Amino acid sequence: MDPQPTLSSTHKPLEFEVRGRCGRARAGYLHLRRCDVATPLFMPVGTQATVKALTPAEIEASGARMIIMNTYHLWLRPTPEVVSAQGGLHEFSRWPLAIATDSGGFQAFSLAALSKVTEEGFAFQSHLDGSRHLLSPEESMRIQGLLDSDIAMQLDVCPDSQASIETLKSAVERTTRWAERCLAVRKSGQALFAIVQGGTNLSLRQRHAAELAELPVDGLALGGFSVGESTETMHGLLEQLLPTVDETRPRYLMGVGTPSDLVRAIAQGVDMFDCVLPTRNARNGQAFVGSGRLVIKQAQYKDDPRPLDEQCSCPTCTGGFSRSYLRHLFIAREILALRLLTLHNVHFYGHLVNLAREAILTGNYATWASEMLARWQSQNK
């Protein structure tokens, strides 16, 4: 079995310890200043310093030990100065465990019509009020320092999946230069991850991963995935890329993904994930269950007295809330429907990575993963 971790006495902002392997899959711990976080791990997304519809206690009860929050949005509202004056994100949001913050780079991609990139940084027009801002690597690190997250992300350039090779090369080169600028100004005691770019070009990705591994960063994130390329293209690339990404540091696949994406990527050696799917899909009436996805508004659930998933131990499933009742709430546009579905989905993801960890530590990951994937694929035929 896996003994309890012991916090390091070296006072590094992050130490990564591998406790078990099964093929390429690995299970370990992130030793952070506030807590130890078991890997593989899934971070619920708390864009506005909250995981939508849930309290911190409910998130913690789901098994989550780290949340990722959004630098760009918190920069504009309520401002990092407001957060800092109230003790940083942990005190402000009342989340007691680990917090990661993104850098704002993905918002430059998703809000491309409102931003322009130069060597200095991203010139933004606020989506809230049209005001103009410059997000440079130094400003991103200043913001994340005031937010006082446990893990900060470097400011990077995330190109479109269909970008030309010249655009991809430019993004990679600039991201490396910006990683160096972020390192020069990062807050003491705050871990920093560099971000590997390169689109779907394997050689460029490998070269960039090697470049960033030469820098004294605490982890390596894989950015620019799930931005337009097919699922099979992504997984094919990960299969070839991961063996070349420094194994002494945690590997974080940003913005991914479905339960099957997690199972497949863990098999290749990914340690960390985040994605909006558990919360966003809940707000759209979708629940993740052991056999796949359940769309609660469908008429077949009108008289269904069963819980969402009879094998699930989340408060929604154990609390007596039937599919029939949840369908009624969702169609009636009751807020409770969104809360109960979100509770279930976040718990589902937390349970999934815990099962993956157990399978790795018992040397059974390949069999477990194959069975999980076969079950979901059968349901989706």
Image: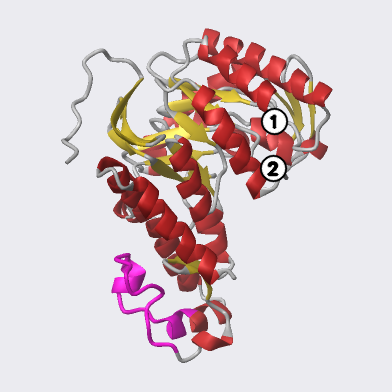
Residue at (25% x, 44% y) in the render = 362
Within 10 Å of disc 1 (Cα), the crowding (few <14, some 14-19, many 20+) is: many
Q: Amino acid at mark 1?
A: Cys
How many marks overall?
Answer: 2
Give the quarter of the image for residue 371: bottom left
**Vertically, is 15 above or below 303?**
above
* Residue 244: % across, % down: 53, 22
| Residue 305 counted in the magenta span | yes
* Image: magenta residue range: 304-326
Rendering colour mode:
secondary structure
Q: Which residue is mark 1?
A: 158
Q: In the rendering, at what x and y percent does residue 146 appear?
A: 48, 24
Circle nearer the N terminus (1, 2) = 1
Q: At which x and y percent is residue 270?
A: 46, 36
Q: Are marks 1 and 2 in contact (CB under 8 Å)?
A: yes
Asked which secondary structure carries label 1, the reply is loop
Q: Residue at x 53, y 64 (%)?
A: 377
Residue 332 is a magenta residue: no
Q: Nearer the viewer, residue 163 or 72?
A: 163
Query: Residue 267: percent from the left, percent from the top?
Result: 44, 41
Q: Which residue is mark 2?
A: 227
Q: Residue at x 35, y 46 (%)?
A: 365
Query: In front here: 259 or 381?
Result: 381
Residue 56 visible to the viewer? no
Residue 1 seen in this snapshot: yes
Q: Nearer the viewer, residue 43 or 17?
A: 17
